[in-house]
Image: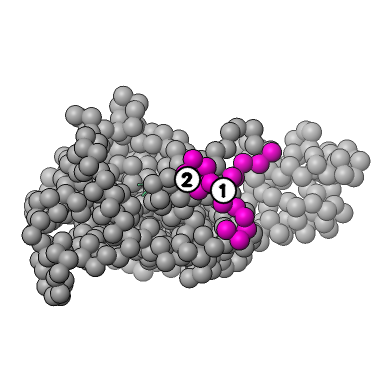
Amino acid sequence: MSILKKLNADLTNLVLEAGYEDNVILLPSNRKDLGDYQINNALTLAKTYHKNPMLIAEDIKNVLQTDSRFTNINIAPPGFINLTLSTDFLISVLNEFNNDHFSCIDKKEPKKIIIDYGGANVSKALHVGHLRSANLGEALKRLAKLVGYDCLGDAHLGDYGRPLGLVLLEIKKRYPHLAFFDESYQGDYSEISLPITNADLEEIYPTASLKAKEDEAYLEEARQITFKIQNHDKGYYELWQKVVNISKEAIKKVYDDLNVSFELWLGESDSVSYLSELKDIFTQKNLLKLSDNATIVEVATTEDKAPMPPLLFIKSNNSLSYATTDLATILQRQKEFAPDEIWYCVDLRQNLHFEQVFRAARLSKIVPDSVKLEFIGFGTMNGKDGKPFKTRDGGIMPLKDLIKLINEETLKRLNPDITDDQERTEISKDVAIAALKYADFLAFRSTDYIFEEEKFADLEGKTGPYLLYSTIRMKSLLTKSQTTYQNITTLPTKEERQLAMYILTLPTVIDKSLETKSLNEICEFLYNLTATYNKFYAENKILTEQDTSLKESRLVLTKIVYDLNLLLLDILGIKVPKKM
Ligand code: ARG
């Protein structure tokens, strides 16, 4: 149990001692002149006990006075209790945190969560639309693991369906003599080398897609190939696998750059083996209906205020729909992993799709009712024109180009004393990712934000580089100290007390982030902690302090803020370089 939780539990008991029963929560004060914290329970208790809140507050104040952790207890009408935590108590909070970070983090009841946050599409470059999913999913996974949940991140590659049929067709047009297309081929497919790189694939798909729009026969041929892949037709299936592997490798590299990794590299195609079982379940439950040659599932209810279209189960051309693949994936996840929850970090604009899928999953009971399915939608990253971010010529911006853009900005701001080119490149990359991620998380998950590379890369203000720079400075101070430092014994300045109070609120920040599935609170916390520390650093002596116990206290405090920054930056998927 975290110190904060224990504090609230003890307060609840003290109030009970005063003769009142209520859940007491210590809140940051609205009137800092009257105390650091306030307790509002007297007001609600007045209703329950039909008693004047000022009298109740007086009773509570009397018991609180018996506890040395609370000082300066005073009452403000109509019954607010203000108080301040004693310096000794704050010192103990810091020392405990220094010994064990979990003194200020609550572990939760274990549960298993699958997080679907990749969604990259094979043979297409990762683009800006995939950025927030990757950032958010990875950070939520790290946060959930921190509190003790068992999490599996799944890349859920878009590796099936028409796009792949198109790619294979275009390869066939360009290299018709490849053995994959030779029905009489008897040899080993693994020996055939494919004259195609990932860069080729990224060009092949848009070319093929354009051709299909203009040429009905081409489109039809692609459909047939899609069908062949889905039916494991030998040559096409082998070629499909090769293409997936080439693409996967390139996709993985971009995710690596973003400091994002997955426990599971499954794709839409992996759910296919569950399709017939899925169909059986839906058929037995009488959920499938024919409509205009397509098979649909009615998911609307009488309570719907807005129209809820039916879920498309099998398209009229007999191919699988995106919804059916997601349903088969739910069935697969249930059978193979039996999770307690599945989280989907996907663009908000896919809200309706997931609403339909979740409803169909409930109707068919492919997962027990107890399994929580959660859509965690995010807003778009926009360009300076306020519209979804595009390249200069209006195309979709590949993620690696976006990283390059921000990298150019961070490189400009790097310390010129770092002269080694390779070192500069490496450091700048870490700083660029920090700039990008911090700005992404600073906006509430569902709000759109504008990509402003200069602002994101700034060394001042609420930015990733500011946090990195400050964190590196803390580290260098600790390295320079060359003394041992173990305990805080004194906490003389306002900033030092403030830092202790921040650390005390850590469980609240973590809970809030897990509840809203947004990292903005953690970003604010990191900024406030760091800015407060920097103010303290600017105004006080540390290394040159003559009073040894004061010096030791300040070094330990520096170490605590440094550790906390590392911990939280790591949750955000941000690496701290050695210098910058
Ligand atoms: N591949 C999809 C896209 O690029 C995203 C997949 C999201 N996850 C899911 N389970 N549907 O739009």
The image position of residue 39, as x and y in percent, is: 71, 45
Question: Quick check: 238 left or right of 356?
Answer: left
Residue at which label 1 appears: 289
In the displayed structure image, the side of residue 69 where residue 152 appears, left or right: left
Q: Which residues are magenta?
A: 283-302
Compared across the picture, whether 27 is left or right of 59 comes to left
Whichever of callouts 1 and 2 sits on the residue coming sooner in the sequence is 1
Q: Is residue 412 left or right of residue 295?
A: left
Q: Secondary structure at mark 1?
A: strand
Residue drawn at point x = 83 percent, y = 44 percent: 45
Rendering coords of residue 341 (x, y %): 55, 60
Going by the numbered disc 1, the residue's amino acid type is Lys
**Res. 294 mark:** 2
Considering only vertical position in the picture, is 262 above or below 125? Answer: below
Residue that sits furthest to the right in the current view: 50
The residue nearer to you, when weighing 130 against 439, is: 130
Q: CA distance from mark 1 to mark 2?
A: 8 Å
Answer whether residue 373 is magenta in the image: no
Residue 284 in magenta stretch: yes
Q: At x 38% / y 33%, what residue is drawn? A: 449
